[in-house]
Image (cartoon, rainbow, N blue to C red):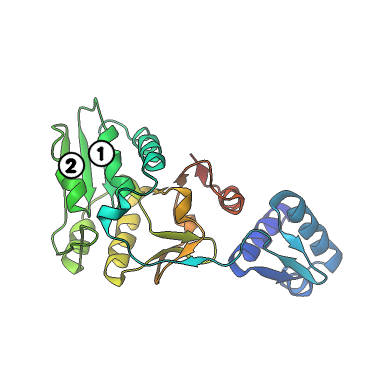
Amino acid sequence: MIYIDRRKEILDLIMRNGSVKVIELSQKYDVGEVTIRRDLKYLAQNYGIQLTYGGALAGDIGGYKSIIETDLTKKRTLNLEAKKIIARKAASLIEDGDTIALNAGSTVELIIDYLEDFKSLNVITLSLNVAAKASAKPFIDVYMPGGKLRSVSGAFYGSDAEAFLEKFSVDKAFFGVVAACVKNGITHPVLEEVHINKVLSQISRNNYLVADSSKFDKVSLIKMMDLDAFDIFITDDELQEVYKSYAELNDIKII
C-alpha cells in the first residue's frame, strides 16, 4: 500500500473511532512506528487531529448531541433561509429529463419551488407534501409509493412501498436528514422510515445529502447509512471542518 492510501485509511479510522495507537497501526500496515508517527504528524498538520504520546485523537470530534423527531410543521420554520439556499443549489443540479427522488423533509420539499423551465421531469418521492407540491407543476410526472403514511413526517413506509421503489432507476436522489455525524453516519429517530430510505439510496446512481450545518454533529436512534454513501454534500458555509476533511478523504464534493 502506498503512503497516500495508508494515510487516508488512518484518518478514516481516527474519524470513525475517535483515536488510534501507533503500535496497532504499525502492526496493521506492517511498517515501522517511525513511519506511522510521520503519517500522524502529516495528518495533524493538514486535518487537525491531536497527537498523543502513543497515538492520535480526533481533535474536532467531540460528543454528539442526541436528538428526537420534530414535527414537520416546526421543521419548516427552522433555519429557513439556509434551507432555501440549499434547496436552490440542489435544484441547480437537476437536468431536463432527469428522474429524481426526494425523501421526506422540510429542505427537500423546498427543492420543488426552484424547478422551473423544464420540459419533463420524473419525481419519485416518499412524501405526500412533496408529491402535492410537485403535482402542481405541469412538466413533472409524480410517482409515489403506497403503504402507511406517518402524519408526523408526511412519509410513506412499509414493504409495499419498498417493493414499489425497487422497480425504478433514479438519476439523482436528494436526502433530507435529521442527524449526521462521522462516527454514526446518518441516523434517524423512527425505525419505520429507515429501510425505505436505504432502498431509495440503492436505486439511485447519485445520492446527495441536503442538510444545513445544524444537522451535523447530531445522532439519533437508528443508523440509516454511512456518510460516504453520498456523492455530494449540499449544505451551508457553517459546516464544521471535520466534515470537510471527511469529504476530501472520501472524494465527496461539497456545495
Q: Position of residue 38 (x, y in %)?
A: 82, 58
Q: Position of residue 64 (x, y in %)?
A: 53, 66
Tell me what residue is drawn at x 70 percent, y 57 percent: 7
Assign the N terminus to one quadrant of the image: bottom right
Tell me what residue is drawn at x 21 percent, y 47 percent: 130
On screen, 84 above or below 25? above
So how many labels did they put on this image?
2
Residue tagged 1? 112
Kind of residue sitting beneath label 2: Lys
Residue tagged 2? 133
Tell me what residue is drawn at x 33 percent, y 65 percent: 69
Residue 136 vs residue 119, the one in the foreground: 136
The answer to which quarter of the image holds residue 234 is top left
Query: How many other residues sit within 10 Å of disc 2, few (<14), some (14-19) or many (≥20)?
Result: some
User: What element does badge 1 sit on?
Assistant: helix
Residue 170 visible, this orientation: no
Residue 223 vs residue 25, the one in the foreground: 223
Q: In the picture provided, is 151 more to the left or to the right than 187?
A: left
Proximity of marks 2 and 1: CB atoms separated by less than 8 Å: yes
User: What element does badge 2 sit on?
Assistant: helix
Kind of residue sitting beneath label 1: Ile
Residue 74 visible, this orientation: yes
Query: How many other residues sit within 10 Å of disc 1, few (<14), some (14-19) or many (≥20)?
Result: many
Q: Residue furthest top?
A: 117
Residue 57 vs residue 77, the one in the foreground: 77
Tell me what residue is drawn at x 39 percent, y 72 percent: 221
Q: Residue furthest right?
A: 34
